[in-house]
Image (cartoon, coloured by chain):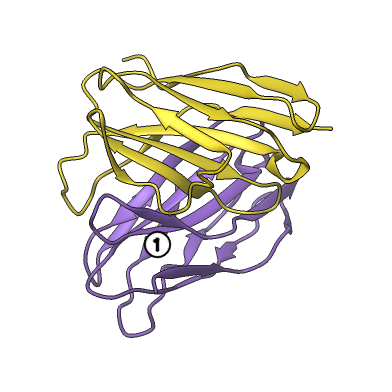
Amino acid sequence: GNSVTQMEGPVTLSEEAFLTINCTYTATGYPSLFWYVQYPGEGLQLLLKATKADDKGSNKGFEATYRKETTSFHLEKGSVQVSDSAVYFCALYTGGFKTIFGAGTRLFVKA
Amino acid sequence: EAGVAQSPRYKIIEKRQSVAFWCNPISGHATLYWYQQILGQGPKLLIQFQNNGVVDDSQLPKDRFSAERLKGVDSTLKIQPAKLEDSAVYLCASSWGQGAANTEAFFGQGTRLTVV
């Protein structure tokens, strides 16, 4: 079946450090891939997306590239800020209107 | 544009009691979702509506959970009777639901349910 696997957290970084959160997926067909972010006390918000292989999604300094050969969609940011502290969810959309979420990775950024 | 509205934000009930959550999606969004997010886990889809029809309720525990979207706009999710393991955040989301590969879901802030 379709599934998403994320690296376990929490991830703790100092401000301005480089961030990578790994995400791999299993899916039939050609899914669209998403990263959602959940700030404390808020609902999930779409951070970025990619709809086909080799697409790069980007937003707010975050990037992720859809790698079909490795079935991965790793989230990266060159220099994190304290305000980036949140839970990050990788997700895939396989059609039939269904989005499947990973377990989430909590990021703490220290000043 | 107004976002997805949910109420209440928090609810504490005793096991075996009943509880109801309400969701008002973004205006014009045909698809509405209810997700259950247990602490430390990703959201799990409980039920999905397309207008007022159910598209997927395969993961809804139908012996105790029910949901409706009578007029194809707002929706209620009910649990009766509640169990301790129902403690979670219940998220409502909506999307245009046109079936495009890049459909984005917009989420409400959620209702945090604690069953004691």
Provide the letter of the chain coloured purple: A
* Number of residue marks: 1
Q: Is residue A3 above or below residue A107?
A: below
Q: Residue furthest front?
A: B63
Where is residue A54? Give x, y as percent: 25, 71
Quadrant of the image occupied by residue A67: bottom left
Where is residue B50? Give x, y as percent: 24, 36
Q: Is residue B115 above or below residue A103?
A: above
The C terminus of chain B is located in which quarter? Answer: top right
Q: Residue furthest bottom?
A: A69
Instruction: Write the residue at 77% across / 24% down.
Output: B13
Instruction: Write the residue at 63% across / 36% down.
Output: B89
Q: Classify mark 1: helix, strand or loop.
A: strand
Q: Which three-letter amino acid code belongs to the residue tagged 1?
A: Ala
Q: Nearer the viewer, residue B89 or A60?
A: B89
Q: Nearer the viewer, residue B93 or A20?
A: B93
The N terminus of chain B is located in which quarter? Answer: top left
Instruction: Specify whether A110 is left or right of B29.
Output: right
Instruction: Specify whether A85 is left or right of A67.
Output: right
Examine the rendering and report whether any part of residue A57 can be seen: yes
Examine the rendering and report whether any part of residue A59 can be seen: no
Instruction: Specify whether B100 is left or right of B25.
Output: left
Where is residue A65? Give x, y as percent: 35, 67
Quadrant of the image occupied by residue A3: bottom left
Instruction: Write the residue at 22% across / 74% down.
Output: A29
Instruction: Specify whether B114 is left or right of A34.
Output: right
Where is residue B12? Give x, y as percent: 77, 23
Disc 1: which chain? A
Q: Nearer the viewer, residue A51 or B72?
A: B72
Number of other residues with Cα within 10 Å of mark 1, as a class: few under 14, some 14 to 19, many 20 or more: many
Residue behind mark 1: A64
Colour of the chain lettered B: yellow
